Image (tube, rainbow, N blue to C red):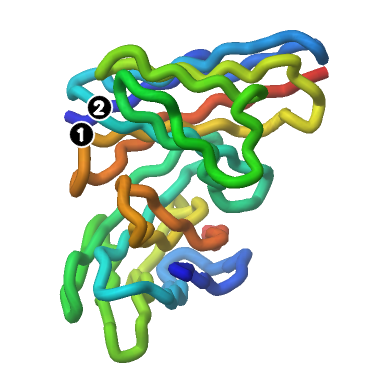
Amino acid sequence: GDSVTQMEGPVTLSEEAFLTINCTYTATGYPSLFWYVQYPGEGLQLLLKATKADDKGSNKGFEATYRKETTSFHLEKGSVQVSDSAVYFCALPFSGGYNKLIFGAGTRLAVHP
Amino acid sequence: GAVVSQHPSWVICKSGTSVKIECRSLDFQATTMFWYRQFPKQSLMLMATSNEGSKATYEQGVEKDKFLINHASLTLSTLTVTSAHPEDSSFYICSASRGSGDEQYFGPGTRLTVT
């Protein structure tokens, strides 16, 4: 069945460090792929998305490229800030329809000054 | 645009009582709303999908008689946790979608504590 696998956290970085959070997926066909971010005590916000192979989604300095060869959608940022501290979720739509989303386990990022 | 609110943002109730959580789409009509449960430091677990005017579809393992979902209008869905117990304490998040092919917009979540 469809699934999403994320690297385990927490990830702890110093400010201005380079960030990579790995995400791989198993799915039927070529679904859209999403990264959501959850700041402490809040709901989820869509960070970026890609709708087809080789697309690059980007927002707020974050990027992720849809790689169908490796079934991956890794999240990257060149220089993280303390304000990026949050939990990041990779997700894809359930192939069964109804717009249901399948989420990865989430990766907690802590950025220190 | 595409703002979703939840009320209350947090609630404490006694064991055995029922509590209702509201999810509203403030600036769009939501054909479909979803309810998720999130345990501390874990991912979101989809509980149920509701389409306006019809019965909710519950995921496997979710007790429909315990978690009552109503989606009576295109801007409001409610989740009622009946006869709450401490193990129901969790962070409940709703999301709303305009329909097939549209993305989900998430509410800020409701933290429920059952004492």
Q: Amino acid at mark 1?
A: Arg
**Residue displayed at 80% across by 23% down:** B85
Question: Which mark is first along the chain, 1 or 2?
Answer: 2
Q: Amino acid at mark 2?
A: Ala
Q: Which x, y percent locates residue B62?
A: 63, 38
Q: Which mark is residue A38?
A: none
Label 2 close to label 1 by CB (< 8 Å): yes
Give the image quarter of residue B49. top left
Q: Which x, y percent locates residue A85?
A: 50, 53
What separation in Å lies between label 2 and label 1 (alpha carbons)?
Answer: 5 Å
Circle 2 residues within 10 Å: few <14, some 14–19, many ≥20: many
On whether disc 2 and disc 1 are found on a single subunit, the reply is yes
**Residue displayed at 74% across by 19% down:** B84
Say whether residue A36 is left or right of residue B93. Answer: left
Which chain letter matches label 1? B
Say whether residue A79 is left or right of residue A11. Answer: left
Say whether residue B56 is left or right of residue A11. Answer: left
Which chain letter matches label 2? B
Element type where label 2 sits in the image: loop
Q: On the image, numbered disc 1 is attached to which residue?
A: B98
Element type where label 1 sits in the image: loop
Q: Nearer the viewer, residue B10 or A28?
A: A28
Q: On the image, numbered disc 2 is attached to which residue?
A: B30
Q: Which x, y percent locates residue B81?
A: 64, 19
Say whether residue B111 is left or right of residue B4. Answer: right
Whether residue A86 is situated above or below residue B55 in the rendered picture: below
Whether residue A10 is situated above or below residue A78 in the rendered picture: above
